[in-house]
Amino acid sequence: MFASWVKMFVKETCAIAKDGNKWEFSNSVANFIKKVRDEDRRVNELRNQELLATAENPRIKRQEETTEICQELRDIKRNEMLQERRRKQLQSNSHELRLLQGQIRSAKVSQELIGQKERLEKLKKEEMRKKREENDKWAEKCEQERRLGIKEAEEQRQYRVEFMSGLKGQIAEQHQRRLKEYEVILKDREEIQNRLRQIKNEEKAEREAALRYRDKCKVEMDECMRNKILQKQLEKQTSKDDLSKFLAYSDEREALKKRIEGERKRLQEERQSLSERIGAQIERIENERQHREEVLLSLLIEERKAKEDARFRHNLEKTNGERLRLRSELENYRDSVKPDTDAQRKEEERLLHEERMRVQRKNDELVRLADERRRKEIMEHTKSLRTIIDIRRRERVEEAIEKLRESERLFGLQKDMDKEIEEERLRLLRSQPPELLRYLPTGVIRPSDRELLNLPGRNDS
């Protein structure tokens, strides 16, 4: 709409300008301005109505709120992505953070190794428990068999005792009859004795068998105990080997950390010594520059003095030459005139003396003026040189101040970088489970970090 009004106004003004009527041109301009203002007013009213309609429409309001929420979420997501990217860049650029990540990975490996070792120990303990149960069962079985053998031997002994008592009763009852049948009885007795010897031999054989079985059980128990001791020694040796490997790994990590700390201290000392050497060299260069400027100033002053002396000697030689010329002319005049009287001679001598004194005064005045001019020039030159020296000194001071500001700025940047690295280090430590932190090498977790990470102290742990 505004473009159409502008085109129409351009056409009308061009037509009026061609006709050359200034009054109509001014009226057309005024009408155009009025139309533009009316059009702006109508546009503003329409815009206000649209704004009111938009504000009263709940759907549009919800849409706007949703748009704002989406924009805020996008901003939050973008800030998180930028923060994550900055943290990754900081982790990749910082040697301390890279070392901490490596130590955390090593701690995870150590935790896994120790967990595996604990699981293996648990399995070994379970196997040992099962073996002990089997040994106990075997010992109980051996004990039951031993008791059964003892019981059987006792029953046999009881049986033999009963048998002997019955036999003795029969012998007592049949004593009279056996006396009669002595020979038969002797034979029977011999048989009985043979039987008794056989029984004794059997008992002895049974006792020897029981003793051999007991010795066999004892040997088996001793063998089991020796196997158990060997198993314990093997487990101790295995645990010692694992512990020695872990201690060697910890010592290696500690040595690596000490080497890194030593290298860092050495770099800091070299940087400090380098800055001191650079400062000493800059101071020496500044002193040499000041010395050169002072020597240059003295040389310039001496050169100016030499030039003034040469000029003064030239003027003095010129004046002496003029004096000698006047004297020669006067003597020539005197020789040519040849005065006759002493009065004329005295008058001439007086005039010559006055002329000599006048020339002497003129020479003295010239010398004085030359000295004053030379002193003024030397003072002006000295003043200009001192001004130049002061300007250079101020420039050097400004450069030194600028360097100091730059160093302070770099120090501030380094301090901010150290602060960000420390925050990232604490974030990495907080992101790890507390059980993992105790596997980190000594010195990684500082005493000040324990309160921040809610960790117990060394004495508490």
Image (spheres, rainbow, N blue to C red):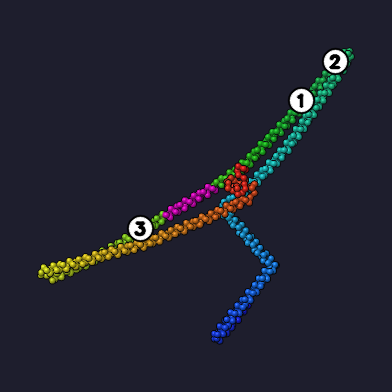
First reached walking from the N terminus: tag 1 or tag 3:
1
Q: Is residue 139 visible?
A: yes
Cα–Cα gap, marks 1 and 3 = 125 Å
Query: Disc 1 vs disc 3: which is toward the camera?
Result: 3
Q: Secondary structure at mark 2?
A: helix
Report the disc number at residue 46. none
Q: Read off the magenta span.
A: 260-283
Give left or right: position of 278 versus 31. left
Q: Which amino acid lies under the numbered mark 3 shown in the image of this protein?
A: Val
Cα–Cα gap, marks 2 and 1 = 32 Å
Q: Which amino acid lies under the numbered mark 1 shown in the image of this protein?
A: Glu
Q: Determine contact: label 3, label 2, CB under 8 Å.
A: no
The residue that mark 2 highlights is 186
Q: Residue at x 45, y 52 (%)?
A: 277
Cα–Cα gap, marks 3 and 2 = 157 Å
Position in image of residue 302 (x %, y %):
31, 60
Does the segment drawn in magenta span residue 279?
yes
Q: Residue at x 20, y 66 (%)?
A: 357
Does the segment drawn in magenta span residue 130?
no
Position in image of residue 297 (x %, y %):
35, 60
Query: Disc 3 vs disc 2: which is toward the camera?
Result: 3
Q: Residue at x 69, y 33 (%)?
A: 226
First reached walking from the N terminus: tag 2 or tag 1:
2
Residue 204, image quadrant: top right
The residue that mark 1 highlights is 208
